[in-house]
Every structure is written in structure tokens, then in C-alpha cells.
Image (tube, helix red, strand yellow):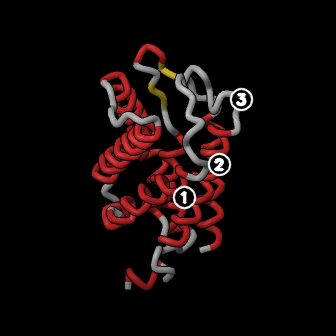
Amino acid sequence: MIRFSITTILLLLAAFAAQQFLPVFTGLHHSRILLVQLAFLCCAVASGQPLMLLLAFIGGFLWDAQCTLAPYPGDPTIYTQPTESLRFGYSILLFAAAGYLMQLIQPLFRQGKWLLTTALIGLTLMLYLTLECGLISFIRGELQIDQPTFLQILFTSLFTTPLAPLLLVPLWLIARACDYDDDQEPLRKHHR
């Protein structure tokens, strides 16, 4: 259990490092690949609730730190409007909510149904981004998501989702190799 937990935490931290080198697709409404959120969602579907909550805390804390503590709260080409009114820590709650949705589809992950799991990860990512944009919009006194924002959410989800199997399959193999089960029982007991 400890080995799998450390592996998922390291995977999430590696996603934060790799995210810095991924480009923004300016021609497609400034969409991009969200490797951090993808790594979190894949780890959340593969882990138990306590580990998922720890990953949500780490991921949300570092995401807010990265976006809030930068000189212009994030990359000015991505964040075109200031978000000073958002409080530090909101991402932890969004990560946790998305993680709980991933907990609901764990049976599909355990059965190795990668295509359906990947599609549901894409829908969860789209919901995460919609909630985040809705929260920012609400804080600014508006409550609308215009067409360019919707297209940015759509294209970001479409570019990020196909990468999910590249993380799901190794996580499934690592969980089996570490004899990890989210019920904290060895996997061998379930196969007898």
C-alpha cells in the first residue's frame, strides 16, 4: 500500500513538472493539455478514498500555489483576466469533488474497461473545468460561460482525454504489482 501511495504522489508531482513544458494551442481558443488534472483523475480512480483525498490536497494546493503566487496569477497568455478574488484553496475542493466522481467508476477500472473509463475521465475533466470557470465567473459578478470559454473547455478536454490510457494501464499494473487494493486488502484474496 505504501509503495503504491508513493508512486501515485510521485506521478502527480511529475505531472506538475511536465505541465510547465506543455504548449498552449492559441489557434484553438487557448486550449491546452492539462496533465496535472489528468494524472490526478487517473490516480483517483486507481486509489482508495484516503489516498485520493491526500492527492486532492496535494494537487489542489500546488495548483493554487502555481496559479496564485505567480507574478500575474499564472501565465498571462492563458489567464487573460486577473483572478485575485479567488481564495487560495478552492482547487483542493474541486480536485476532491472530481476525485469522488472517479471513486464511483472504480469498478470499471478494476475490470480493465479502459475505453469507458477514459470517456468518463474526459467527462469529469470537462465538468471540473466548467465548475472552475463557473466559480471564477461567479466571483467576478457574472454567471455565464461564453462561447470562446466553452470551446476552450471542450478542446482542452478533447486534447487531454486520449492520454488517459497512457496513465491508467501503468497504474493498473503498478497496483497489481504492489498488491494494492482500495479496500486495503491484498489483491490475491479476491482471486481465490
Asked whether, in this view, residue 51 is left or right of residue 188, the answer is: right
Mark 2 nearby-residue class (10 Å; few <14, some 14–19, many ≥20): some
Asked whether, in this view, residue 75 is left or right of residue 32, the answer is: right
Q: Which residue is mark 3?
A: 71
Q: Image quarter for residue 27?
A: top left
Q: Is residue 49 above or below residue 24?
A: below
Q: Amino acid at mark 2?
A: Leu
Disc 3, SS: loop
Q: Earlier in the sequence, mark 2 or mark 3?
A: 2
Measured as percent of width and height from the top left, residue 143 is found at 34, 37
- Can you see residue 1? yes
CB atoms of marks 2 and 1 within 8 Å: no
Query: Which residue is depicted at the point 52% across and 49% down?
Result: 39
Query: Which residue is depicted at the point 54% across and 55% down?
Result: 92
Q: Earlier in the sequence, mark 2 or mark 1?
A: 1
Disc 1, SS: helix
Q: Amino acid at mark 3?
A: Pro
Measured as percent of width and height from the top left, residue 3 is found at 64, 68
Is 48 or 116 nearer to us in this picture? 48
| Numbered badge on residue 62 | 2
Disc 2, SS: helix
Q: Which residue is mark 1?
A: 56
Mark 3 nearby-residue class (10 Å; few <14, some 14–19, many ≥20): few
How far apart are the alpha carbons under marks 1 and 3? 25 Å
